[in-house]
């Protein structure tokens, strides 16, 4: 691991949380990443200049919790300007797939390894942490991340500022049904929010060094307070999550061709056939994803004409 890290990247939580709740329910965590040299505005600005443009998404932070994704206001700044002017930019930004930078990959893996060891495992693979990815969030004061779901498990670590993170239990499908889960996985993550959902939620009030665990496809919204905010999502996908996501994507593609599909799990035999076909096809096109232009084309083919909504022309 990275013996040269300036701050040891360690996540801690109660033993009950790590043994009883993980990975099925959210819980609070603490971490030692606040102040890490890779997580300062200056270093994040460099990362924003280095990342391919299709791995950066940003817009106005003046959004509603229940936000129509087609009506999100934009910000007329480039990614580096957003970071450098975050206190006054009125913006929300996410830098995606930061593990593509070797330094950030080590940071993510070291952090998850601390969780694996706390749970009694000796390695990331033994603990089931695969397809590890990182997402860095930089937000202006009083910004909102609308109600949405993510297609991976996530340790969310808060680095700077103050933030409210509200997570909602959708295990019975009463907040988002099967069709909405598929849509959020393949089209756009936002969901409609209703105040009636509040009893199903838990709010975490985060300051530097705080965080929370967000299970796969648990809806949530986020709000910053009166200071700019830096946070990071450390995500991974288990074999089961990869299976479900692949089925959602392939089902969505088939629906686009006018072919109705059953929800994953309703027909296991047919699910297995679809997975084999989809993964074979993906293996053929995967080398094309090295090109940003081809990534845009492939996203449009797989996810529809609005798949590149976050890229300015």
Image (cartoon, helix red, strand yellow):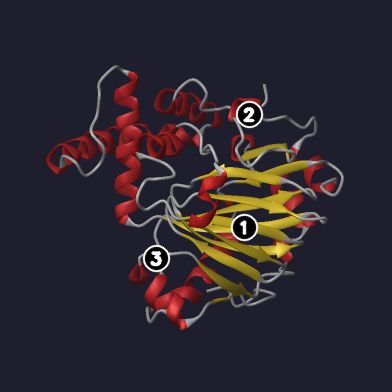
The image shows residue 187, relative to residue 6, as above or below, that is above
Residue 256 appears at what percent x and percent y? 35, 20
Q: Secondary structure at mark 2?
A: loop
Q: In the rendered image of this protein, does residue 182 appear above or below residue 139? A: above
- For the residues labelled 1 and 3, the Cα–Cα distance comes to 18 Å
From this view, report whether residue 173 is shown above or below residue 129: above
Mark 2 surroundings within 10 Å by alpha-carbon count, few (fewer than 14), some (14 through 19), many (20 or more): few
Q: Secondary structure at mark 1?
A: strand
Dot placed on the residue nearer the N-terminal end, 2 or 3: 3
**Mark 2 to mark 3: distance in Å?**
33 Å
Q: Which residue is mark 1?
A: 165
Q: Secondary structure at mark 3?
A: loop
Left or right of 304 in this view: 239: left
N-term-proximal mark, 2 vs 1:
1
Residue drawn 60% across the image and 66% down it: 211
Residue depicted at 43% across the width and 80% down the height: 16
Q: Tell me the mark number nearer the camera, choosing from 2 and 3.
A: 3
Q: Residue at x 68, y 71 (%)?
A: 209
Mark 3 — residue? Answer: 23
**Residue farthest to the left, as pictured:** 269
Q: Earlier in the sequence, mark 1 or mark 3?
A: 3
Residue 133 visible in the shown view: no
């Amino acid at each position: 691991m990275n013996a040269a890290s300036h701050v040891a990247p360690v996540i801690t939580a109660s033993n009950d949380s790590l043994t009883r709740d993980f990975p099925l329910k959210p819980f609070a965590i603490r971490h030692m990443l606040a102040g890490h040299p890779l997580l300062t505005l200056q270093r994040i600005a460099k990362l924003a200049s280095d990342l391919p443009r299709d791995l950066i998404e940003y817009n106005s932070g003046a959004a509603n919790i229940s936000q129509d994704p087609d009506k999100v206001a934009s910000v007329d700044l480039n990614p580096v300007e957003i970071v450098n002017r975050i206190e006054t930019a009125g913006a929300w930004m996410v830098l995606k797939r930061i593990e593509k930078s070797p330094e950030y990959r080590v940071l993510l893996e070291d952090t998850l390894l601390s969780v694996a060891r706390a749970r009694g495992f000796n390695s990331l693979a033994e603990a089931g942490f695969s397809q590890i990815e990182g997402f860095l969030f930089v937000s202006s004061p009083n910004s909102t991340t609308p109600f949405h779901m993510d297609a991976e498990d996530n340790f969310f670590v808060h680095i700077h500022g103050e933030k409210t993170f509200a997570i909602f239990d959708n295990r019975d499908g009463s907040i988002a049904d099967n069709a909405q889960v598929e849509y959020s996985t393949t089209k756009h993550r936002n969901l409609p929010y209703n105040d009636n959902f509040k009893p199903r939620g838990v709010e975490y009030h985060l300051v530097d060094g705080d965080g929370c665990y967000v299970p796969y496809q648990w809806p949530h919204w986020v709000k910053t307070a009166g200071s700019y905010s830096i946070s990071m999502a450390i995500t991974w996908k288990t074999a089961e999550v990869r299976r479900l996501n692949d089925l959602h994507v392939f089902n969505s593609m088939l629906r686009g061709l006018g072919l109705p599909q059953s929800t994953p799990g309703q027909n296991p035999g047919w699910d297995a056939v679809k997975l084999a076909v989809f993964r074979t096809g993906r293996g053929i096109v995967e080398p094309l994803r090295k090109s940003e232009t081809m990534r845009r084309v492939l996203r449009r083919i797989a996810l529809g004409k609005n798949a590149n909504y976050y890229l300015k022309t």
